[in-house]
């Protein structure tokens, strides 16, 4: 741990805040509601307010209709037919209102699977603005955040995971993932609380 509270030093101009899927889709009364979201939302709001122009929001867009998708996604959307675009209120895919108001200047990138990397837009955007460090918040710790982190590691980004700004529906798998990051990915993932980010990213 450095004097800055971050293992590999302070954050600079080549850093962005990547906020994963903080959408109405995952808030009450949705069947996909993440109970921790109200707890982490104020922390994420504070970071976005300070660094709106350096924030990228991802949004998860479900399939258009039940049974659509490749391979196991067809089964997934048969199970979650009520959560397809044809059945949802269009407002459900929007960011939480307190975050949406910051875009612009924040950027919004949509995706149709857990990972934001396969469709290419995120990688292209980061390359254009010469980003090498990602401060990651959002949900869920053990699904879309996990896919985001692993892709970032593969592409060689410095990953700073904000542990008290992540939400999940499962305490057990959230805790297990944080243990994995500490024990298996320590060279590539730094785990800190929001207080450290707010004080060290100027």
Image (cartoon, helix red, strand yellow):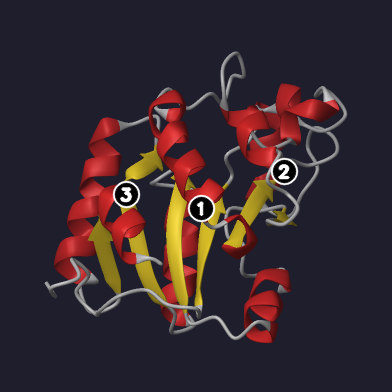
Under circle 2, the secondary element is helix
* Local crowd size for mark 2, using a 10 Å CA cut-off: few (<14), some (14–19), many (≥20): some
Which numbered disc, 1 or 3, marks the residue closer to the eye? 1
**In the rendered image, the vertical position of residue 101 relative to residue 107, given as above or below:** above
Image quadrant in which the C terminus is located: bottom left
Dot 2 or dot 3, earlier in sequence: 2
Which numbered disc, 2 or 3, marks the residue closer to the eye? 3
Report x, y in % for residue 104. 75, 53
Distance Cα–Cα, label 2 vs label 1: 40 Å
Query: Residue at image x 51%, y 53%?
Result: 50
Q: Which residue is mark 2?
A: 74
Which residue is nearer to you in this view: 193 or 122? Answer: 193
Distance Cα–Cα, label 2 vs label 3: 38 Å
Dot 1 or dot 3, earlier in sequence: 1
Report x, y in % for residue 89. 82, 22
Q: Which residue is mark 3?
A: 194
* Local crowd size for mark 3, using a 10 Å CA cut-off: few (<14), some (14–19), many (≥20): some
Query: Residue at image x 44%, y 50%?
Result: 137
Residue 39, by quadrant, is top left
Dot 2 or dot 1, earlier in sequence: 1
Report x, y in % for residue 20. 54, 50
């Amino acid at each position: 741990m450095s004097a800055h509270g971050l293992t590999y030093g302070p954050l600079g101009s080549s850093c962005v805040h990547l906020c994963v899927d903080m959408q109405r889709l995952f808030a009450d009364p949705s069947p996909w509601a993440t109970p921790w979201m109200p707890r982490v939302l104020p922390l994420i709001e504070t970071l976005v307010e300070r660094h709106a122009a350096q924030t990228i929001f991802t949004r998860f867009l479900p399939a258009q209709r039940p049974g659509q998708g490749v391979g196991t996604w067809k089964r997934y959307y048969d199970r979650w037919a009520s959560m397809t675009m044809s059945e949802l209120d269009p407002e459900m895919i929007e960011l939480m209102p307190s975050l949406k108001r910051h875009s612009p200047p924040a950027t919004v990138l949509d995706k149709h699977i857990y990972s934001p990397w396969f469709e290419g837009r995120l990688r292209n955007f980061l390359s254009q603005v010469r980003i090498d460090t990602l401060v990651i918040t959002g949900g869920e710790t053990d699904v879309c955040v996990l896919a985001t982190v692993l892709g970032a590691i593969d592409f060689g980004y410095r990953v700073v995971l904000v542990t008290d700004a992540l939400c999940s529906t499962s305490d057990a798998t959230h805790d297990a993932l944080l243990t994995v990051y500490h024990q298996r990915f320590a060279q590539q993932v730094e785990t800190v609380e929001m207080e450290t980010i707010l004080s060290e990213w100027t």
